[in-house]
Amino acid sequence: MTRPLQRLRVHLRIVDGDVAPVVARYREHIQCRPGCGECCRQSFKVSELEGALLREGLAAADATTRAEIVARARNYAAGEACPALGSEETCLLYAHRPRICRKYGIPLWHPERPHELKTCRLNFRGVADLDADLIVEPQAGWAADWIALREELALGPQDNRTIAAWLAGDSDMSEG
């Protein structure tokens, strides 16, 4: 595994570790679970580094799964299910999913829009007592760590592409 992917995995462990307490506290207000692919029908754009992680997961998949994902990625149109979403509405590249896929479902905070929280339309309906320390503070830390990661790895401007574009790739990964 390359140094950039190792550092990305550290960042993703931070995200996963901070999402878990939100899910534990608000479980009854979160519909996310295997079989729900609601958020997987959006065209999220992810960084080159996250694209490399997705491609690593794709390369590790069995040949049949890899061929199915690549075919769906190459034929992808906005609004369709993510090419990595399997027939059971579960992610076939779950361990290699990007940041947005790990945090989507909890109320999302963005440093450029600090006055708002966004979440899946299925989640947090009618909840008025959100714990900002549990939800916002960690996300500010994610933003800071993402900046630190980019500086540590001397990453310049990133080529952000859709997940489908990263999975379609330039080379034919459908061959074993």
Image: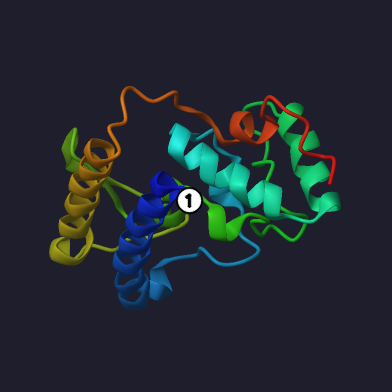
Residue furthest to the front in view is 2
Q: Would you call the spot at circle 1 few (<14 residues within 10 Å), some (14-19), or many (20 or more)? A: some
Return the x and y of residue 151 as percentages of the image width and height. 22, 37
**Of 66 and 140, which appears nearest the observer?**
66
| Residue underneath mark 1 | 101
Question: Is the residue 165 above or below the residue 32 in the image?
Answer: above
**Of 134 and 168, which appears nearest the observer?**
168
SS state under label 1: helix
Using the rendered view, name the quadrant where residue 163 is placed.
top right
> Quick check: 119 left or right of 168?
left
**Of 141 and 54, which appears nearest the observer?**
54
Residue at the image position 47 percent from the left and 41 percent from the top: 50
Q: How many marks?
A: 1
Q: Is residue 67 visible?
A: yes
**Of 79 and 151, which appears nearest the observer?**
151
Return the x and y of residue 118 as percentages of the image width and height. 32, 46
Amino acid carrying mark 1 in the image: Cys
Residue at the image position 52 percent from the left and 37 percent from the top: 51
> Quick check: 111 left or right of 175?
left
Q: Is residue 46 visible?
A: no
Residue at the image position 37 percent from the left and 71 percent from the top: 23
> Quick check: 88 left or right of 131?
right
Return the x and y of residue 109 as percentages of the image width and height. 24, 46
> Quick check: 51 left or right of 145?
right
Question: Is the residue 72 above or below the residue 90 in the image?
Answer: above
User: What colour scheme was applied to this rendering of the protein?
Assistant: rainbow
Return the x and y of residue 98 as percentages of the image width and height. 47, 47
